[in-house]
Amino acid sequence: KKQKRKPSGIYSGNKIKKNLKKHRKASKFYRRKIFHYKFKQPFMGAPMAKGIALEKIGVEAKQPNSAIRKCLRVQLIKNRKRITAFVPFDGCLNYIDINDQVLVSGFGKKGRAKGDIPGVKFKVVKVSGVALLSIFSGKKMKPRR
């Protein structure tokens, strides 16, 4: 039985070009470029986005860990999409009130969930224009409305 090979030879350029074009959609980088997946995501290609805190929720950690991770439901201002964002640092959920404006960023895993928190791809960075870390460490106070 004769094996099928790639076209090779001095006059095979058009055939190679045709094959590349035919199988181009198999490449994930080509699909990402052509179908504009970036703009279908919640942040629409931006690194961070502002939103309004809707409710505080607890997300159960995946096995083998056993914990309730403190998260926040946020409605983004730019496109009204609702996302779940993780609240870092111990007890920082107490500094966030409902209807506060929060700044949300990605988790740094290229759009994937981090660690044992299922389905949570974002984290809270700022609350009412003040960094959550500086509130947690006691350097700044959250401004009163």
Image: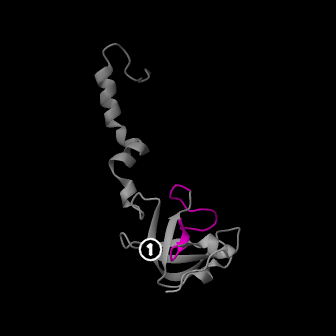
Three-letter residue code for mark 1 = Gly
Residue sitting at 71 percent across and 67 percent down?
A: 64
Inspect this view and state whether residue 88 appears: no
Inspect this view and state whether residue 24 appears: yes
Residue 133 lies in the magenta stretch: no
x, y percent for residue 9: 36, 14
x, y percent for residue 56: 55, 82
Q: How many numbered circles does the render carry?
A: 1
Residue sitting at 56 percent across and 81 percent down?
A: 96
Residue sitting at 39 percent across and 55 percent down?
A: 38
Judge left or right: residue 127 versus residue 15: right
Nearer to me, 4 or 79: 79
Judge left or right: residue 19 versus residue 96: left
Q: Quadrant of the N terminus?
A: top left
What is the image's colouring?
one colour
Nearer to me, 124 or 29: 124
Residue sitting at 40 percent across and 23 percent down?
A: 6
x, y percent for residue 143: 54, 82
Judge left or right: residue 27 versus residue 69: left
Task: Please give the range of residues in magenta.
Answer: 109-129
Residue 116 lies in the magenta stretch: yes
Nearer to me, 84 or 127: 127
Residue occupied by mark 1: 51
Q: Main secondary structure of the magenta part?
A: loop
Nearer to me, 96 or 57: 96
